[in-house]
Amino acid sequence: MPVRGPIFLPGDKSIAHRALILSALSKGKTFINNFPVNKDCLVTLEAFRKLSIKINISKDKVGVLGKGLYGLTKSESPIFVGDSGTTLRLLSGVLAGQNFKARLTAGKYLSKRPMLRVTKPLRMMGAKINSRLKTQDSRREEYAPIIISGGNLKGISYKIPVASAQVKSAILLAGLFAQGVTKVSEPISTRDHTERMLKLFKANITVNKKEIKIKGGKELVSPGKVYIPGDISSASFFIVAAAIVPGSLVTIKNISLNPSRLGVVNVLRRMKANILAVSCQLSAVSCSEPMGDLVVKESVLKGTTVKKEEIPSLIDELPILMVAACFAQGKTVFKGVGELRVKETDRIKSMTENLTKMGAKINVSGENIIVFGVGGLHGARVKSFGDHRTAMSMLIAGLVAKGKVSVDNVSCIDKSFPDFIRTLNALRKQ
């Protein structure tokens, strides 16, 4: 059955986190529209409530009464961030600048994700941080729970060893509170939502290609209203569905077209997916984020090579791209995908195991994955591994598999897209 029709998707999760954080750190009211009501964004919202920020939410509209850079107050109990890596890492940067102690606790999956990449630069800036330590093969790593005693930060110059927008953002947010200038250099350009949002809130920030500078001590100024464009990561599942399901035609409305997030679209176009971007415009985020519509229809896909430097712009979309590769002519090579092993689950393992059960031919060598187009998949019982993107990817694969595909524990999809199954079913009824 083809997928057909127009859809509006919830706001971009990455942008929403940052809008909430900077709204809380600026003085006065900020209204956020098209806010995605998913588990990850809600834990960020609740975290700032525990830090004394008044926040009202009604459906997809959020009102935040900010108190300025130094208006947060100590939470009397630990702040639980669920399995939201964005919340844990960005909030660590904010708390590094506060003159009180805070304890951050995480869910089962996030507690296994490495944090030294964040705690190390924050300590260099002057924050005192205790965390759960683990040494394996003489390598030291840190994990949640994390206790942060912040304040008295100083600007640093830091070259991020691993391309990560979350690490970059944590340092920049700490830089808001630091004395002097904080300079961040990244090896490969990553998503730039934090830089755009900081500019929107009038932070003292300059961006020069892969180097970002922020001067601390300047109060933020709320733009009053922020509109969150649709989430391109959520859209990627419907883009691939429209490309691989015969007879499909889907229009995705008001979606984020931020160049640093269009890696998935660029790769699929290279694979000859029929994707048209129309009415690209700057959204109502006061010229902060571009958005527009994407029209996608049934395509004959061809294999391609995805280079290591492309991975940061599509890290969250790699699972669904692996599904697309199964239906492409020839082979598709993904290079330098090691970061997939430290997401909510080891996504290299989850996707390879599941797709192989369904008849895919996949080779994994170190940080490289080769997917051979097999022209089709068959039904099987597969696992979500508790990972939302794995679960959604397997449901899309099931649309064109011969036979029944059953996915255990799809409740994990609530982490980013609670209405995913309802939206998919609506497209199949058009």
Image (tube, grey):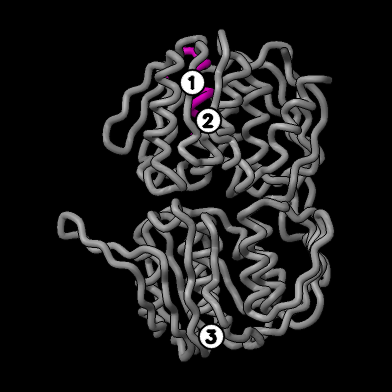
Decide which of tag 3 and tag 1 comes sooner along the chain. 3
Q: Position of residue 56 (x, y in %)?
A: 80, 68
Mark 3 residue type: Gln
Residue under label 1: 381
Q: Quadrant of the C terminus?
A: top right
Q: From this view, report whether residue 49 is shown above or below residue 60.
A: below
* Residue in the image at 58% along x and 58% along y: 192
Check disc 1 and report its element: helix, strand or loop.
Answer: strand
Please name the predominant secondary structure of the magenta segment in the image: helix
Secondary structure under badge 2?
strand
Q: Position of residue 85 (x, y in %)?
A: 50, 57
Q: Nearer the viewer's eye, disc 2 or disc 3?
A: 2
Mark 3 highlights which residue?
98
Q: Residue 397: horizontal and vertical position, in percent?
A: 56, 21
Circles 2 and 1: CB distance less than 8 Å? yes
Q: Position of residue 190 (x, y in %)?
A: 51, 54
Does residue 166 appear to the left or right of 337 in the view shown?
right
**How many neighbours does mark 1 have within 10 angstroms: few (below 14), some (14-19), or many (20 or more)?**
few
Q: Nearer the viewer, residue 341 or 369?
A: 341
Whole-number angstrom distance, CA of label 3 to CA of label 1: 48 Å
The Cα atoms of the two marked residues, 2 and 3, are separated by 42 Å
Magenta extent: 319-331
Query: In the image, is residue 32 above or below residue 189?
Result: below
Q: Residue at point 56% right, 67% down?
A: 207
Residue located beneath label 2 in the image = 408
